[in-house]
Image: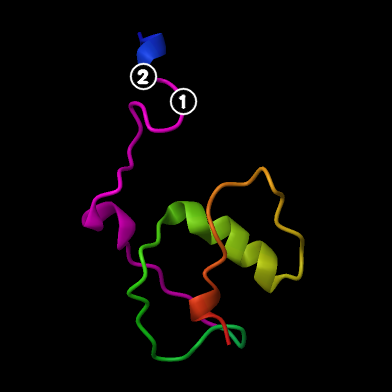
Amino acid sequence: MVSDLCTGRGHGTHSSLSPHALHNTLIANGPDFRHGWNDTMPTGNIDVAPTILSVLGLEVPKTMDGRILSEVLR
């Protein structure tokens, strides 16, 4: 049984703000991405969806968490 105290953002999730959680491996390929480049900015899985929406030319909803990984884009 999950306690009500462990629900919601920042409570009982599988993420944190540690360097290990914010420097995951993500490999992207295609004409929109920089070639042979390693991003040192803090990033996480939460940033993938806004980045893909941006690459596809779709609007990123204001309610969506995460950021566009603009530094990896051409």
Instruction: Quadrant for the N terminus, please.
Output: top left
Q: Position of residue 30 (x, y in %)?
A: 57, 84
Q: Residue at x 32, y 62 (%)?
A: 24
Find residue 40 and report its image quarter: bottom left
**Residue 45 counted in the magenta span:** no
Q: Residue at x 36, y 27 (%)?
A: 11
Main secondary structure found in the magenta portion = loop
> Which amino acid type corresponds to the residue marked 2 in the rendered image?
Cys
> Which amino acid type corresponds to the residue marked 1 in the rendered image?
Gly
How many angstroms separate mark 1 from mark 2 (CA)?
7 Å
Residue range corresponding to the magenta coloring: 7-29
**Secondary element at tag 2:** helix
Residue 3 visible (yes or no): yes
Give the colour scheme of this rendering.
rainbow
Left or right: residue 12 versus residue 51 is left
Left or right: residue 2 versus residue 67 is left
**Count of marks overlaid on the render:** 2
Q: Position of residue 65 (x, y in %)?
A: 56, 47
**Secondary element at tag 1:** loop
Residue 2 visible (yes or no): no
Name the residue carrying label 2. Answer: 6
Name the residue carrying label 1. Answer: 8
Dot 2, how many residues are within 10 Å of its Cα: few (below 14), some (14-19), or many (20+)?
Answer: few
Q: Position of residue 60 (x, y in %)?
A: 70, 56
Dot 1, how many residues are within 10 Å of its Cα: few (below 14), some (14-19), or many (20+)?
Answer: few
Label ID, residue 25: none
Instruction: From this view, report whether residue 22 is shown above or below residue 62.
Output: below
Instruction: Quadrant for the C terminus, please.
Output: bottom right
